[in-house]
Image: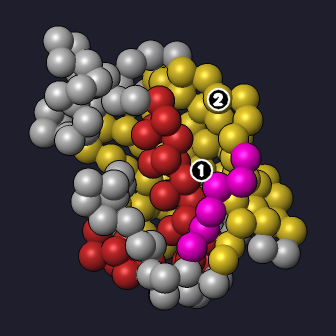
Amino acid sequence: MNTDSCDIDEIKRLIPHRYPFLLIDKVIDIVKNQSATGVKNVTVNEPYFPGHFPSSSVVPGVLQIESMAQTAAVLVAKSLNISDPNALVLLTTIDNAKFRKPVIPGDVMKLVISVKRIRNKLWKFGGQVIVDTQRVSECEFSAMMRI
């Protein structure tokens, strides 16, 4: 199986997100129209930690989902050979979200994304956040391509 990857510079060419809302550092193991794994190195310097929570820093669950969605957007862009950062992959649904364990500074989030279905411009995904070897969160989500 032919896999691809992209570093932060290529990610910025593929999706419009920028600091402080670019939430992935690289994407590896890309199999077009099938799957990809995003990587996010969580540092104590993340801009949301001073408010979530000051005495015990935890990555918000909604940002874990957004990290999965950004990984999925890179997968869509690579699958469709789109290199226009103005092309958008917009979330349409989030289902069955579960958060099993907090993600904290020092963790490396592996964002494991699989394509469940593609219909025209609508893509459905399954996503998991893995830290070390433990699944810490998961959800299903759909997104629509807007060029």
Residue 23: x %, y % from top left? 35, 52
Residue 82: x %, y % from top left? 56, 86
Identity of the residue drawn at 33% across and 55% down: 21
Identity of the residue drawn at 51% across and 68% down: 74
**What's the mark number on residue 134?**
none
Q: Which residue is mark 2?
A: 97
Q: Is residue 4 rendered magenta in the image?
A: no
Q: Nearer the viewer, residue 144 or 82?
A: 144
Q: Nearer the viewer, residue 24 or 20?
A: 20
Q: CA distance from mark 2 to mark 1?
A: 14 Å
Q: Is residue 90 rendered magenta in the image?
A: yes
Q: Is residue 3 toward the left or the right of residue 109 in the image?
A: right
Comparing marks 2 and 1, which lies closer to the viewer?
2
Q: Which residue is mark 1?
A: 113
Identity of the residue drawn at 30% across and 38% down: 108
Q: Is residue 50 toward the left or the right of residue 78 in the image?
A: left
Residue 129: x %, y % from top left? 49, 36
Q: Quadrant of the C terminus?
A: bottom right
The answer to whether residue 105 is seen in the rendering is no
Q: Quadrant of the N terminus?
A: bottom right
Span colored in magenta: 88-93
